[in-house]
Image (cartoon, rainbow, N blue to C red):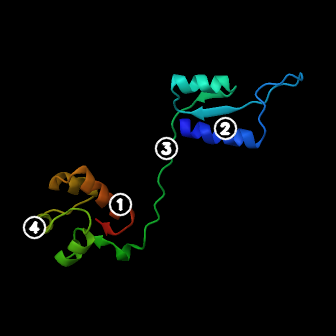
């Protein structure tokens, strides 16, 4: 938040913000809206005559534009060579790919959560695989 305050102050300087006036005109108004603000920073804002307004944190959904599905490697149907290429850079080893191929003969994987849970993937491996799903490099 303090980094944002510095940028905000630069903007206020650019527009010649006047937090108080002695000429009888009302002062300019400035507000910072954020989900949280430490008390020390709130005090800094008050001294600069900037009002802090607390708001709820809003997280925008990530917009993913997948590539055409024909380029995605289907975890349930791809051969070993294709799977090795698809899993490159994720930390999934060849022995895990072999187990996946054996297991999928009796069960289809529906999504990444199911696969990650069954194969005991670490959070880091799952995150790398999720990136590949988001880019439509792999599918189920």
Label 1 sits on residue? 131
N-terminal of the two: label 2 or label 3? 2
Disc number for residue 9: 2
Label 3 sits on residue? 59
Nearer to us of marks 2 and 1 is 2
Instruction: Decide which of 13, 108 is in the foreground and name it.
Output: 13
Q: CA distance from mark 4 to mark 2?
A: 61 Å
Q: CA distance from mark 1 to mark 3?
A: 19 Å
Nearer to us of marks 4 and 2 is 2
N-terminal of the two: label 4 or label 1? 4
> Dividing the picture into quarters, in which one does residue 99 lie?
bottom left
N-terminal of the two: label 1 or label 3? 3
Nearer to us of marks 4 and 1 is 1
Helix, strand or loop under label 2: helix
Q: Is residue 81 above or below residue 140?
A: below
Q: Counting other residues with Cα less than 10 Å from the Cα at mark 4, is it few (<14), some (14-19), or many (20 or more)?
A: few
> Dividing the picture into quarters, in which one does residue 55 lie?
top right
Query: Residue at the location (25% across, 50% down)?
Result: 123
Contact, mark 4 vs mark 3 (Cβ under 8 Å): no
N-terminal of the two: label 2 or label 1? 2
Where residue 140 appears, as percent x and y from the top left, is: 28, 65
Where residue 134 appears, as percent x and y from the top left, is: 38, 61
Q: Counting other residues with Cα less than 10 Å from the Cα at mark 1, is it few (<14), some (14-19), or many (20 or more)?
A: some
Disc number for residue 102: 4
In this rendering, position of residue 123 left or right of residue 26:
left
N-terminal of the two: label 4 or label 2? 2
């Amino acid at each position: 938040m303090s980094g944002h305050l510095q940028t905000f102050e630069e903007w206020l300087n650019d527009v010649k913000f006047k937090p108080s006036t002695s000429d009888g005109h009302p002062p300019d108004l400035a507000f910072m809206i954020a989900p949280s603000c430490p008390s020390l920073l709130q005090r800094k804002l008050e001294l600069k005559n900037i009002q802090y307004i607390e708001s709820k944190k809003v997280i925008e959904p990530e917009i993913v534009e997948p590539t055409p599905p024909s380029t995605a490697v289907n975890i349930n149907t791809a051969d070993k060579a294709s799977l090795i290429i698809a899993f490159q850079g994720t930390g999934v080893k060849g022995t895990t790919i072999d187990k996946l191929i054996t297991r999928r003969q009796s069960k289809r994987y529906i999504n990444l959560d199911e696969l990650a849970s069954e194969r005991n993937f670490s959070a880091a491996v799952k995150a790398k695989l999720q990136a590949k799903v988001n880019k439509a490099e792999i599918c189920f």
